[in-house]
Image (spheres, helix red, strand yellow):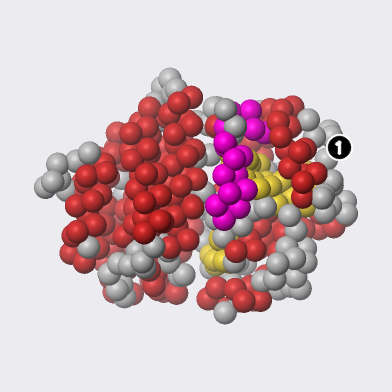
Amino acid sequence: MTTIINYLTRIRFGRGEVGHIDEELRSLGVSRPLLVTDKGLMESGVFQSFMKTSQLPSDTPVFQDTPANPTESAVGSALALLQKHDCDSLIAVGGGSSIDLAKGVALLATHAPPLRQYAVIEGGAGKIQPDVLPLIAVPTTAGTGSEVGRASLISMRDEHKLGFISPYLIPSVAVCDPDMTASLPRYLTAATGMDAIAHCVETFLSPRVNPPADAIAMDGLKRAIQNIEDAAGENPSMEARNEMMMAALEGALAFQKGLGAVHSLSHALGGFHELKLHHGTLNAILMPAVLRFNQPHCETKFATLREVMGLSVDADVSAFFAELNARLGLPGRLGDIGVTREIFDKTADWACKDHSTPTNPRPVTKADFLEILAEAL
């Protein structure tokens, strides 16, 4: 059954909705999109499935070199391809990396370079004008929520991962089709699912007052906790895939309220090009340590988290997430994925400047970030 949602942007949600791509292009008044994806999806057959279902012309130009963490140089390469083919729009097919990269291209297609000047920490949010190119986002993972988010996270040439945030960067249309996640490997299902959970938890703990966002975040958290182990299991049901995609969508609809130190650190660590760290995996590893740090400042909200997740009133929420990570087969420590103490100082510096830090429920200093990193190592 088709579900049409208008909240921040237009959302088509349901199995088979990719078949309505042409209709959405016409409604936007565009006809020459650049497709943005990654080589992994090309090799897995997911992109070919998208092309078949969407019935887009076979000669539609495709940028397939999206890195695991989108980079400034990749944005430049995709922009050159868009300009070469005189494209008037973009369709991002993939996870948050492809969608975030497409947002960067949509921005620079109509705004003067350099890209860095539009970053939040550079005071650039107000420089982003409404005339970014239309973008249709088709997520193939259930995690980042970038398909309805106003942010794009891009690693600069100096490896500093910056946030570009504006309502004008929210995709024009999000096509959320659970069929696009059907062949997602178990590990990525788990890691991206934990990203969605981190969004819901950190949004709820954010000190900003936004009851509708809190309600959406808690509904998303409940769906995710009840379905992530099925979705990441050996024989996942499509119902679980559907619920995880909705949980991811809700986490992103809610995180307009702001995130916290989990994301401050995962953004910083994700900027190191050589390490190629997965964002969802980082969030999963960091969450127990950050929750332990934050709990003394938000005990009432922790009681709500326990209730929503079906835990006992005295359950250790941080321990629950560490145990969930283990059941999902995710790494338990930063050291397991190649992080060493040598990058802690730079990571903590970058985390202090990250746009998610001001909305952490407990004020956090560089020394605090260093302690959290040491605990998670």
- Residue range highlighted in magenta: 3-18
Q: How many marks?
A: 1
- Against 310, residue 75 (above or below) is below
Q: Residues within 10 Å of mark 1 (few under 14, many from 20)?
A: few
Q: Is residue 157 magenta?
A: no
Assign the N terminus to one quadrant of the image.
Answer: top right
Is residue 91 among what the camera can see?
yes
Secondary-structure class at tag 1: loop
- Against 354, residue 58 (above or below) is above
Is residue 98 among what the camera can see?
no
Q: Is residue 14 magenta?
A: yes
Of the pair 28 and 69, the residue shown nearer to us = 28
- Outermost residue toward the top? 235
Rendering coords of residue 210 (x, y %): 39, 62
Q: Amino acid at mark 1?
A: Asp
Of the pair 158 and 118, the residue shown nearer to us = 118
Residue 237 occupies which quadrant of the picture?
top left
Predominant secondary structure, magenta span: strand
Q: Who's the residue at 83% across and 40% down the image?
A: 60
**Along the horizontal axis of the image, is 180 left or right of 327?**
right
Rendering coords of residue 144 (x, y %): 50, 48
Q: Who's the residue at 70% across and 31% down the image?
A: 19
Rendering coords of residue 52 (x, y %): 74, 27
Residue 123 occupies which quadrant of the picture?
bottom right
Which residue bears the numbered disc 1? 59
Rendering coords of residue 301 (x, y %): 24, 57
Residue 119 occupies which quadrant of the picture?
bottom right
Q: Who's the residue at 62% across and 76% down the image?
A: 126
- Outermost residue toward the left? 314
Assign the C terminus to one quadrant of the image.
Answer: bottom left
